[in-house]
Image: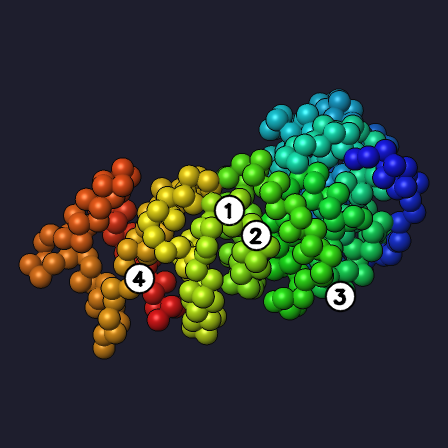
């Protein structure tokens, strides 16, 4: 973070409010393991607050699935006090980033992170420095709705208007969007993921936010494919998946995410319309993504960039190879039964043909068991898409 930006935030006073009467807050803070963690910090006179995601969820009336905490205590200070209190520590890898994971009562693992600022960033990772300034830590976070803190008495500390943005269902970066994105280019995809979780409209993006994204899409080139796929898969499982994938393409992310240079957005929109109207459970994320692909080469290009699982790669190849072959049938499942076995009932004829085709493009064929699994996934998906 630039020193000038830090100077502007140092000493910033947060907006405060009490959430103590929220039923969701009461249910979380009454957890005996949370109280046990609080007791340790109280004993050694270090503040402890919920940070980021759980605060956002509590304000939205949701019980958080994960609880993240922040404190001014350094990792060494936390290790010392937890050791004295005979609390087991696990996952030491987070320590260099300021995170200590404490296992409370042999039941719950809680991550507690020291307040920090980013000294140096390269678009993928940051060199951090610990601080006791809550405003500086809030300033380094990605979105306003993720930059709030909540102490265990119920007092909210909101430095960048996150609560107001939640009320408006607005998704905005903390401070200058371009700065936040350039600190970690994966925040481009995190923006779309949280847009799907928070916004009440499919396409109400702010012009400046989209402009900042378009200006910085090339930065995704340095982000690992695994991290990109982790975010992209969550987007495809969330609200407005079709609209957000279309917007991602419009913003120019395709070539940096392993997608075709000329994605088939017409097919994407048609598939998403059928999926939305079907009333059936959401298909596998790869199913929707594959609507952008025209050929097996498109699939293999995606796999080379995103490093998806073998099953996800094979599902995409299977859909591309078979989506045009199924004529309407009075018994909707029948075409897929035909794909499983031939007329004699014994030979997986299409499996043999398919494995030969995969071999020609130097791709290891899956087992017959995996092939059957693909058939059943594709069959379920096809009902939603037909």
Does dot 4 land on a helix, a strand or a loop?
Answer: loop
Residue receiving disc 3:
168
Q: Are marks 2 and 1 in contact (CB under 8 Å)?
A: yes
Does dot 1 land on a helix, a strand or a loop?
Answer: helix
Q: CA distance from mark 3 to mark 2?
A: 28 Å
Q: Which mark is residue 323?
A: 4
Picture coordinates of residue 372, whole percent (x, y):
25, 52
Q: CA distance from mark 4 to mark 1?
A: 24 Å
Number of the front mark, 3 or 1? 1
Picture coordinates of residue 54, whole percent (x, y):
70, 50
Q: CA distance from mark 3 to mark 1?
A: 33 Å
Q: Look at the image and tell me in which quarter the C terminus lies.
A: bottom left
Circle 4 packing at 10 Å, graded few (<14), some (14-19), many (20+), is few
Picture coordinates of residue 138, whole percent (x, y):
80, 43
Q: Which mark is residue 255?
A: 1
Residue receiving disc 2:
252
């Amino acid at each position: 973070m630039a020193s000038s930006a830090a100077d502007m935030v140092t000493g910033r006073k947060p907006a405060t409010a009490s959430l103590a009467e929220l039923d969701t807050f009461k249910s979380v803070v009454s957890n005996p393991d949370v109280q046990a963690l609080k007791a340790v910090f109280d004993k050694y006179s270090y503040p402890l607050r919920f940070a980021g995601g759980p605060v956002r969820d509590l304000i939205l009336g949701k019980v958080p699935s994960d609880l993240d905490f922040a404190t001014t205590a350094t990792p060494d200070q936390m290790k010392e006090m937890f050791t004295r209190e005979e609390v087991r520590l696990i996952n030491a890898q987070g320590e260099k980033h300021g995170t200590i994971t404490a296992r409370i009562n042999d039941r719950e693992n809680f991550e507690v992170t020291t307040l920090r600022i980013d000294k140096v960033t390269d678009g993928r990772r940051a060199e951090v420095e610990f601080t006791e300034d809550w405003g500086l830590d809030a300033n380094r976070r990605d979105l306003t709705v993720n930059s709030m803190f909540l102490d265990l008495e119920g007092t909210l500390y909101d430095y960048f208007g996150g609560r107001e943005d939640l009320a408006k269902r607005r998704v905005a970066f903390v401070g200058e969007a371009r700065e936040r994105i350039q600190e970690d280019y994966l925040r481009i995809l995190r923006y779309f993921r949280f847009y799907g979780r928070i916004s009440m409209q499919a396409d109400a993006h702010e012009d400046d936010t989209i402009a900042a994204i378009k200006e910085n899409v090339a930065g995704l080139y340095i982000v690992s494919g695994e991290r990109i796929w982790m975010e992209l898969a969550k987007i495809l499982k969330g609200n407005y998946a079709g609209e957000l994938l279309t917007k991602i393409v419009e913003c120019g992310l395709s070539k940096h995410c392993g997608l075709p240079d000329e994605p088939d957005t017409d097919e994407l929109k048609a598939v998403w319309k059928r999926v939305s109207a079907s009333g059936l459970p959401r298909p596998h994320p790869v199913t929707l993504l594959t609507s952008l692909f025209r050929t097996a080469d498109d699939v293999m290009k995606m796999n080379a960039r995103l490093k998806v699982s073998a099953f996800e790669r094979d599902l995409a190849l299977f859909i591309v190879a078979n989506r045009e072959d199924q004529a309407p049938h009075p018994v909707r499942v029948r075409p897929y039964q035909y794909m499983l076995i031939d007329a004699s009932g014994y030979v997986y004829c299409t499996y043999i043909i398919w494995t030969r085709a995969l071999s020609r493009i130097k791709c290891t064929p899956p087992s017959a068991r995996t092939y059957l699994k693909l058939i059943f996934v594709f069959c379920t998906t096809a009902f939603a898409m037909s």
